[in-house]
Image (cartoon, helix red, strand yellow):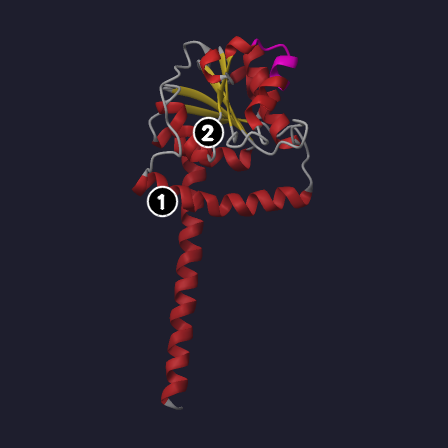
Amino acid sequence: MTKKARFLIKLKRIIASLILAVVLFTLLVNSYMILYANRYIYDIDELDSVPPRYAAMSLGAKVFSGGTLSHILRDRVITGTELYQKDKVQRLLFSGDHGQDEYDEVNAMMDYAVESGVPESDIFLDHAGFSTYESMYRARDVFECDELVIVTQRFHLYRSVYIARKLGIDAIGVCSDLTNYRRRTDVKNQVREYMARVKDFFIVEFFRPLPTYLGDPVPITGDSDLSHDQ
């Protein structure tokens, strides 16, 4: 066997070992995050058992033209609204992407909740919830939430609860899986979430960067108009 051939074999073994290490680490992080958060999560059929919190935060997702909510986002708003109507929470916080005038998740969420009977005065809007991490950070530092019910689909809830609790928020989660989402969408979300957990593990455990925007406090116990479009 030539020197070059031995080198290539060694190189392939090193690359294979690195790939295996990355895969194992990814599995470990995902398992840790799921186990950490699972004890704080309630299924959609357990709403009556959810411990009261002052506010529930529904996380943003795709909004179509004209302000139509995607199925995933609609289910998050419906579940948050049900918690409010069951007197499990006193305020709703909608956190999503409103970084451009032509794309607005949070006002579409509020419009849907208001149509369902929730007063605007009990709805707060986080226009700069550009990521799950930023939503949790801003919930703590801008809206001064020290406790929350987080509302999103189960695949997303593990990471959301993990981040919130690591940032010092007494958070529990409620699954908003009301719809049988298309198989392709479900698989795509699961794969994306699998990698996002690893990313946010490093962000939370080692870096904790400031969110894109902070701004003046808008306490969740105060006037919700301060969070609405002026």
On residue 202, the disc is 1
| Residue 25 visible somewhere in the drawing | yes
Counting the numbered discs, the total is 2
On residue 128, the disc is 2
- Residue 19 locus on image (x, y percent): 43, 62
Q: Give the range drawn in magenta.
A: 112-119
190, above or below 106, in the image = below
- Residue 227 locus on image (x, y percent): 46, 17
The residue that appears at 45% across and 24% down in the rendered structure is: 172
The residue that appears at 38% across and 70% down in the rendered structure is: 14
**Secondary-structure class at tag 2:** loop
Amino acid on which the number 1 mark rests in the picture: Phe
Q: Are marks 1 and 2 in contact (CB under 8 Å)?
A: no
The residue that appears at 38% across and 34% down in the rendered structure is: 211
Point out the frontmost of discs 1 and 2.
Answer: 2
Amino acid on which the number 2 mark rests in the picture: Ala
- Quarter-of-image position of residue 144: top left
Q: Does the magenta stretch include residue 3?
A: no
Residue that protrudes farthest toward the bottom in the picture: 1
- For marks 1 and 2, give the CA distance: 22 Å
| Residue 86 visible somewhere in the drawing | no
- Quarter-of-image position of residue 136: top left
- Quarter-of-image position of residue 23: bottom left
Q: Is residue 113 magenta?
A: yes
196, above or below 174, in the image = below
The residue that appears at 39% across and 66% down in the rendered structure is: 17
- Residue 228 locus on image (x, y percent): 50, 17
**Secondary-structure class at tag 1:** helix
- Residue 99 locus on image (x, y percent): 50, 32
